[in-house]
Amino acid sequence: MPPDALSFLIDECLHASLVEVANGMGHIAYHIEHLGLKGAPDWQLWKRALQDDSIFVTNNAQDFRKLSRKSEIHPGLVLILPLVRPEVQRQLFRRGLEYLAGRTNLINRVIEIDLHKEKVDIQEIELP
């Protein structure tokens, strides 16, 4: 893995094509469905992200914020907040990855990517 590449685990509530976006930008990404975890409970997905040292990417902000707060340390969380079509998900994720350019980790960080009309809003917070 290149030194500035990040590892992502993408939730099933988001389109599998986000893997291609991350890989195309020099990162490593896996989709829940490709790992045989479709339908697994959130806590199990979070545990897998922790074990793999992967940043979890989801639309399920409420549940995964709670899980991140319960972890003393976690590799990071990316929330694509609006429920949008796959092509818009890809655009938002690409913008989030551009925001993260040059970062080597997101330890205990949450990146929230939102869309307000035509403007992409990215916020970074520390959790727990």
Image: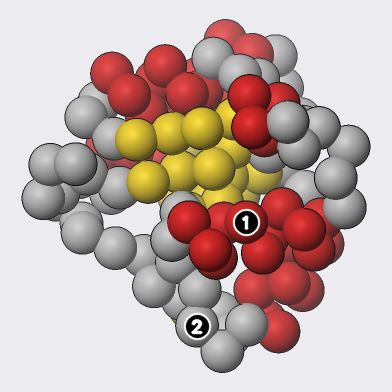
Q: Secondary structure at mark 1?
A: helix
The amino acid beneath tag 1 is Arg
Residue 76 placement, left or right of 72: left
Residue that extends furthest to the bottom in the rendered view of this protein: 72
Q: How is the image coloured?
A: secondary structure
Instruction: From this view, report whether residue 11 is shown above or below residue 34.
Output: below
- Where in the figure is residue 54, as x and y percent of width and height? 46, 54
Q: Nearer the viewer, mark 1 or mark 2?
A: 1
Q: Is residue 87 left or right of residue 27?
A: right
Q: Of the numbered discs in the image, which one, if any, rests on residue 48?
A: 1
Location of residue 10 (image quadrant): top right
Tell me how far mark 1 sits from mark 2, CA to CA.
Answer: 14 Å
As drawn, is 37 to the left or to the right of 31?
A: right
Q: Residues within 10 Å of mark 2 (few under 14, many from 20)?
A: some
Q: Which residue is mark 2?
A: 73
Q: Which of the 4 quarters of the picture holds residue 77? A: bottom right
Q: Residue at x 39, y 40 (%)?
A: 96
